[in-house]
Amino acid sequence: MDERIHEHAQILTGWSAQIESGDNVVMSVESGAHELAVAVAEQVGDRNANLLTTYASGEISRAYLRAHGDDFDADPAHALSLYENADVVLSLGGGRNTRATADIPSETKQASDTATQGVREARLDTDWVSTVHPTRALAQQAGMAYEAYQDFVYDAIIRDWERLAEKMDRLKRRLDEGSEVRIRAAAGTDVTMSIEDRTAVNSAASVRYDSHNLPSGEVFTAPADTEGTVVFDVPLTYRGERLQHVELTFEDGRVVESVADNEDVLQEILTTDEGARQLGELGIGMNRGIDRFTDNILFDEKMGDTVHMALGRAYEACLPEDRQANQSAVHVDMIADMSTDATIEIDGEVIQRNGQFRWENGFDAE
Amino acid sequence: MDERIHEHAQILTGWSAQIESGDNVVMSVESGAHELAVAVAEQVGDRNANLLTTYASGEISRAYLRAHGDDFDADPAHALSLYENADVVLSLGGGRNTRATADIPSETKQASDTATQGVREARLDTDWVSTVHPTRALAQQAGMAYEAYQDFVYDAIIRDWERLAEKMDRLKRRLDEGSEVRIRAAAGTDVTMSIEDRTAVNSAASVRYDSHNLPSGEVFTAPADTEGTVVFDVPLTYRGERLQHVELTFEDGRVVESVADNEDVLQEILTTDEGARQLGELGIGMNRGIDRFTDNILFDEKMGDTVHMALGRAYEACLPEDRQANQSAVHVDMIADMSTDATIEIDGEVIQRNGQFRWENGFDAE
């Protein structure tokens, strides 16, 4: 077995999920993630925790959901009690076909999701962590050869997370103290937003930081009163459709102009509800192991030298207790490259230029 | 997908497990049984039952158990509650290596089994059914080519079970009425045993008959006071060791003489405890879809035109309420061919000759 699979399993069970002796662990395995599951099982055993393994197969879900009517029982007791009695849920993604569930009717999927909301909430109440095993299907989606994709995934995951968490904490503190962020980039971006009274989240791929994805590596907050224009030059996939060259102009916090190569898809997002025209998130990607777009948001939005902004729902954790976060049925992350001719300012001070932070070697003060 | 996989799934969910709308179903999938799992998921959805899929991988068990110490938590709450809240548990066997767990220390396996006895009992309290998907690993163990093995498995499973259940019921009633069985075969078998007051079980591969294996197809009871000699001419594997040409002689119900090619293995069985020298089961194989030995007891003991007798533990269901079944830590099934020069008599009447029953066409009355 590739030694990196063992390292991945160690980071997942140790740093990310912080599994302790006696923990009841549910490990969910996608059909292509078998090898990682074996390595993780070894770690769970080594930590004297209790393992139950579930099988998350897109083909099984598809067969079940298509055959079932749209009338689902609410929160079946066997699934609900499994998660209610779990301390940790590890989801090992990595299918053999990323489009395996493409022909499940969306009403069926929605009806099933709605009926099992309690099961999902019980799962989110655990110390859950989602990660991904590099499969050929994911390599294909990324437009990469299999071995190159494996290198890409392990570069993103096998990092000194403790050190990165300290670095990210520095940015988090700066954002927490600040009032206004201004982002400029040569592609045409010049935008300001308020972060007054907001609390940034240090997403360091560990339940210790309330961060549940491995890889992670971003600091994010919930901005307000956005003004100006942003060009998102990294493509994204929304409900199976490619969205590219998005340009949004904001006034009083709301999108007033929008352009994109696939304008219909962008309009579908913006007209979802009132909250979809406002930003729910400003995220700053800090994982320099991720150096390219691979059409997988788990990786893309963490890319070093990028920022992303999400239209729609904001995270409550970023707001003061008496203030409500932006509400919306959508949360669509869009990414902008910051590696050249680009700056991030907080209250007039440049804290990042061309991807380098003020406190890093190589930062160009002017 | 091979149409027989769909038929297998229909028989499993319909005839065997009798799944109804609203049932909470746990489907356990071995690593090679994915295709069957997809077909079963479709059936479970079609019946409006609630599906949760677990992954039963020998490689995952091995990694977990070897890394874990021998001190296991008793009945972890997440696993226990899953089965306590399940109505049906379907186990889809079919690994990719039948020896995947060969190097788990037996003490570790035992310690784990002992600690999770409550979980196992909760599972056995459901309408559980175990079946097997034909994999290359199982074909190899059977000494067969893959396609030929697929044919073999589906011939055993895709049957008119309702009709077979009626046939088997005829034999069951005859055994229930009878007092003494005599079995003779050219290989040297001539043995009598009492079945007075015993109740035979019609093992028709359905929870309706309290029969939990698919395929099945045997009628069995718990005999007493065995006298005479039996030659078991079908080989078997006991704890990884081949046992062949076993000849046992009984007096007053106990083995007094024994011969085998691998005498040590036979002695290990016979000296396990007091109950290991007595018969716990007489089974009559009635599944004529199974026409050869494949080194898999799930199939071998159901073979048409055979009988099997088990040394050791008897099933309580076969005895009157006030009588205790033979107790033993072992239950080792051994098989004898009855297709030529062989008879089964009940109270002096020949009910089977050369594999044909008295009530079948082709039965030779003399």
Image (cartoon, coloured by chain):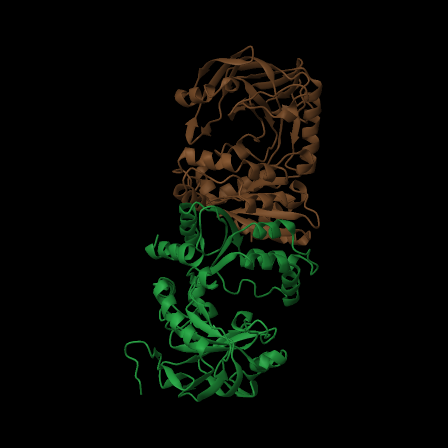
Chain colours: A brown, B green
* Vertical position of residue B315 compared to residue B339: above or below: above
Q: Nearer the viewer, residue A228 or A330?
A: A330
Q: Quadrant of residue A164?
A: top right
Residue B259, image x, y percentages: 53, 87
Residue A68, position as x, y percentages in the image:
41, 42
Q: Residue at x 50, y 80 (%)?
A: B196
Q: Is residue B39 visible?
A: yes
In this rendering, the answer to whether B329 lies above or below A353 is below
Asked if residue B293 can be seen in this view, the reply is: no
Place of residue A100 in the rendered image (x, y in percent of width and height, measured from the top left): 42, 42
The quadrant the C terminus of chain B occupies is: bottom left
How many numbered discs?
A: 0
Residue B159 is left or right of residue A365, and the answer is left
Residue furthest out toward the left: B362
The residue positioned farthest toward the top in the image shown = A252
Q: Observer-nearest residue: B315 or A24?
A: B315
Q: Nearer the viewer, residue A11 or A149?
A: A11
Query: At x 68% / y 23%, what residue is drawn?
Result: A199
B158 to the left or right of A30: left
Q: Name the residue located 64 percent from the left edge and 40 percent from the top edge.
A: A126
Residue B216 picture location, percent across and down: 43, 66
Give whichever of A178, B276 is nearer the camera: B276
Residue B240 is left or right of residue B35, and the answer is: right
